[in-house]
Amino acid sequence: MGGAPYSFEIEIPRRYFDVGLSASSGQMFRWKQTANSEWVGANGKHWFRVRVLDGREAYRVESSGPPTVFQSLFRLDWDAADVTETLTRLGPELEPYLQAMPGLRLTRSGDAVETFFSFLCSANNHISRITGMVNHLAAYGPRLEVVDVIDLHRFPRVATLAKVEEAELREKGFGYRAATITQIARELESRGGEAYLRSLGAMPYERAQIELLGFKGIGRKLADCIALFGLDHTEAVPIDTHIWQAATRLYFPHWQGTALTDRKYEEASAFIRNRFGRLAGWAQQALFYENVVNWRTRK
């Protein structure tokens, strides 16, 4: 490792910020725990190495970016105690889910392009396989740093990804997603690339969702994932199998055991959004990851 431009400490109780839990909970896919229990990752044009300071409620962070980049990525500008209090006041049923995942935070990607393509890889997929695909796409970008033998790249720009051939991705195990990713990359470039995605973050959530649904291959769940994790629309509520199980258990018991249709998706998503407002995405993440961890043992 050639040395970090920035090295700093973050003091925060673990119950309000668990970096490993937040980095590995299906919100972003380029983080890895090292043999010495540090967390190494990248987001957009920045890399990070994070370790827990022994005997202290604090982290030591080495990064290519200033503290504000790391703080923004993990929403450390949001008071987790206030968020938890507000969520449990608005929805007391969330309390056991929040208690089961202390330190889990809703992230805020610094690179909408990375998030956009990460969730294109997520269709009918699981976290470990998505991680491999996203890291393969990242390798089309320039190298940022090698940290503990982990090769970290700046996520490539849209123009670069628009030149990738479908066959290249199929050879790497992307399956049918290879065609989707390459076609959407070219369409995204034609719409303005990075500038277009920034414009989606600046417009109301409902308009951004409509724009995203205009891409062939992006349905409601992918549009909501991109809106929530990449465009800072924190009222977005993606509904996948795990959220559907949680939602029918808590809010729609008459739908338990039934298939998720477009109508049910809209109703469930709107219910959670109306219940929790701008914190709906945080509530969604708690419900999602608790179910990921516990669904096999839940009757």
Image (cartoon, rainbow, N blue to C red):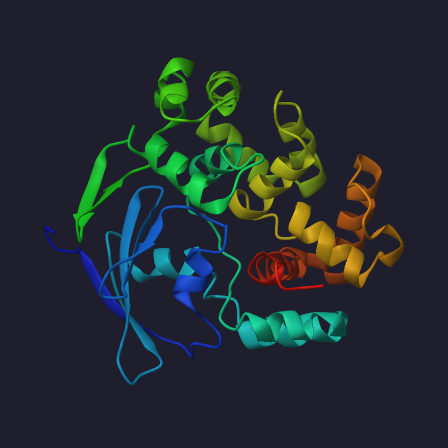
Going by the picture, which residue comes out furthest to the left?
2
Q: Quadrant of the rendered structure where residue 152 is? A: top left
Q: Is residue 93 left or right of 253 when viewed as pictured? A: left
Counting the numbered discs, the total is 0
Residue 255, image x and y in percent? Answer: 85, 50
Residue at 28% x, 50% y is 47
Picture residue at 74% right of the left edge, 54% below the top = 273
Identify which residue, 257 or 246, lies in the foreground.
257
In this rendering, position of residue 289 left or right of residue 38: right
Name which quarter of the figure residue 21 lies in.
bottom left
Q: Say if 23 sits above or below 191 in the image.
A: below
Residue 74 visible from this viewpoint: no
Q: Give coordinates of residue 295: x percent, y percent.
A: 63, 59
Which residue in the rendered view is the most extreme toward the bottom?
55
The furthest residue to the right: 254
Which quarter of the image is occupied by the C terminus? bottom right
Q: Is residue 188 above or below residue 93?
A: above
56 over 21 or under it: above or below: below
Decide if residue 214 is in sight here.
yes
The residue located at (53%, 47%) in the rendering is 229
Instruction: From the viewer's side, name the closer residue of 174 and 183.
Output: 174
Residue 67, x across and y down, in percent: 31, 62
Residue 205: % across, % down: 67, 42
Tell whether 148 sits left or right of 66: left
